[in-house]
Image (cartoon, grey):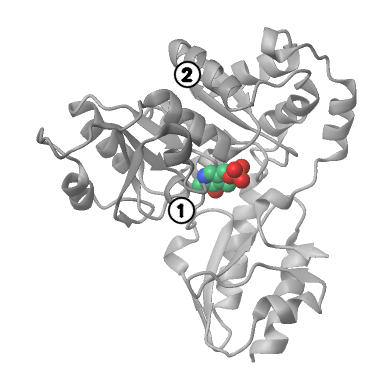
Amino acid sequence: MLDFRSDTVTKPTEEMRKAMYEAEVGDDVYEDDITVNTLEEKLAKMLGKEAGLFVPSGTFSNQLALATHTKKGEEVIVMENSHIMIDEVGAAGMISGITIRGAKCVNGGYDMESLRHVYREDEDIHFPDTTLICMEVAHGNGSVCSIDHMKEVYDFAKEREVPVHLDGARIFNAAISLGVDASEIAKYADTISVCISKGLASPIGSILVGSKAFIARARRYRKLMGGGLRQVGVLAAPGHISLDKMIDRLKEDHDNAQYFSKEIAKFDCVEVMADRVDINMVFFKLFKDIKLEEVLLKEGILINGAENDEYRIVMHNDVDRKAVDKLLESIKKYVS
Ligand SMILES: *Cc1c(COP(=O)(O)O)cnc(C)c1O
């Protein structure tokens, strides 16, 4: 099967499995696991932050950041189509007892007018306190906003003495797309959540980075959330390979996405969301009365069904250019 549903489907490489087998481990609740400690330090250093914390998933990492940044009854601003708002099971209300307020999104960033509008400047007996602003780079819709925009949002938050949390699930894809070092993006956030289980091909995990004091508090909340793990070095070991060896190859996924988007745009009844092909994902609409996921399944190809009328194709380590050609051929059979 060729699987284009997500970059989360990547299987750990042989080298990763070997590293898991050989990992030096200890009890991480006692902070004794060298493999996880060094992984946390490595990512923190790469992003210019003081400390890091390994957690089971990106959702866990974002929600842990919200829990650590806020107190019950406070309000957090996010982009209205962000992962934290849409795809985290309403966890912010459940875990942190906070409300989430969405501002409009343009080009993978905030519509600044909308951000200004939803941010509560005045004190009013009716209003909750806004104590965090979240960013998402790269955005889950495939686009990457500019560094200037990240700075604009960060400055907006700092003028109001509010911290910024960055959902950087695909921060390295964003960095490659912008042609900058990831630390350049990280400058404009106080805390950052990074997924190693997507394009970087680790089987499990995200890492939350921030100041030493923040991470010390997050460590307690992680325990509260059931995320105090023990000999977790077996899971952190592939993370080292993700950070050492898998970042540069993300460019191949971006190239494959560019290639696919240009080729599929030539088909009748296809509209590519061409302004959003900044990373490894291509979104397109199909003006034909078929369920593409069902017909492709017969060809040995997995894709997700359309969401908001858009299909999404995701490139990753386990699909090469030949696989992309097979995908194009198969789609062509049914649409032209
Ligand atoms: C994948 C993703 C996450 C985290 O997802 P998990 O499946 O919980 O690891 C968070 N934010 C964005 C933008 C993502 O794409």
Q: Identify the secondary structure beneath mark 1.
A: helix
- The three-letter amino acid code for the residue at tag 2 is Lys
Residue marked by disc 1 = 86
Query: Residues at badges 2 and 1 in contact (C-beta under 8 Å)?
Result: no
Q: Nearer the viewer, mark 2 or mark 1?
A: 1
Residue 79 located left or right of residue 117: right
Residue 106 quadrant: bottom left
Marks 2/1: CA–CA distance: 28 Å
Which residue is at a point 54% across and 78% down the rendered structure image?
265
Disc number for residue 49: 2
Which residue is at a point 32% across and 27% down the rendered structure image?
163
Which residue is at a point 30% across and 40% down the rendered structure image?
148
- Compared to 260, does 294 lie above or below? below
Q: Quadrant of ligand 1?
A: top right
Foreground residue among 87 and 147: 87
Q: Position of residue 14 (x, y in %)?
A: 88, 38
Q: Position of residue 71 (x, y in %)?
A: 35, 26
Q: Is residue 24 visible?
A: yes
Q: Is residue 329 visible?
A: no
In which quadrant is the N terminus drawn? bottom right
